[in-house]
Image (cartoon, rainbow, N blue to C red):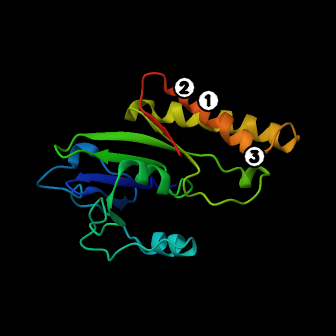
Amino acid sequence: MADRTLVAYEREHGYDTHYAHDGVDPERLGPETPTGGDADRDLTRLRDLLAERGITLGADRGGTAVDPDPLATGLSWPDVVAGLDYRAYDRCLRVSHDWDASAFLVCWFGFEARGGDPCDPVGDGALLAVAERDEPFARGWFEGVKSTVADGLRCGLYGEDAARGYLGGRVRAFAAEREVFVA
């Protein structure tokens, strides 16, 4: 599976969002390499898969780690969080003016693959700040909690709105001192 990352660059007018496939090393983002340098990949299959979901990537220009064509420009951070397709992305990088990058695990709250109703994945989840070394643990923790909540949902213990609310609370509790944004 690819590491689909939304990269949000802070600009004077707000955040510009870009797509990165197969991960992007935050250490490689800087004034000389704003798109993370060269990436060795073929985006044909990815473009086809995303097109099925209504997402169009810009033209491939030299195969950089981050697609140089923005998906959106001039967004506030709350708009980035609320407008994110939580099913389409695995990570989110917020890159400040001085090129400091904050990494977030994308937690999708949708239950459709686990017996729930189909729903719009835009704005349906949370961003949880994680260090790279902690991301696999945090992802496993979230998927475990989500599976447990899905079991209760399938058994009729509560509805999907209550399940999403509970997931949001659990992610906030897990975050403790870390940044967390629940859409």
Q: Residue furthest right?
A: 155
Q: Secondary structure at mark 1?
A: helix
Which residue is found at the position 19% from the left and 56% from the top? 34
On the image, the x and y values in percent for residue 35 come to 23, 58
Q: Residue at x 82, y 39 (%)?
A: 158
Q: In the image, residue 30 lies at what x, y percent?
A: 16, 49
- Tag 2 and tag 1, C-beta contact below 8 Å: yes
Q: Are marks 1 and 3 in contact (CB under 8 Å)?
A: no
Return the mark for residue 160: 3
Identify the element where label 3 is drawn: helix
Label 1 crowd bin: few (<14), some (14–19), many (20+), radius 10 Å: some
Counting other residues with Cα less than 10 Å from the Cα at mark 3, is it few (<14), some (14-19), or many (20 or more)? some
Query: What's the CA distance linking mark 2 and mark 1?
Result: 6 Å
Question: Which amino acid lies under the numbered mark 1 shown in the image of this protein?
Answer: Arg
Give the answer, above or below, for where 100 lies relative to 56. Answer: above
Mark 1 or mark 3: which comes first in sequence? 3
Give residue 57's quadrant in the image: bottom left
The residue wearing badge 2 is: 174
Between 84 and 148, which is closer to the camera in this rendering?
A: 84
**At which x and y percent is residue 18?**
34, 61
In the displayed structure image, the side of residue 45 where residue 102 appears, left or right:
left
Q: Which residue corresponds to mark 1?
A: 170
Question: For the residues marked 1 and 3, what is the alpha-carbon distance in whole angstroms?
Answer: 15 Å
Query: x, y (%) of residue 131?
Result: 38, 32
Q: Nearer the viewer, residue 39 or 6?
A: 6
Q: Amino acid at mark 2?
A: Phe
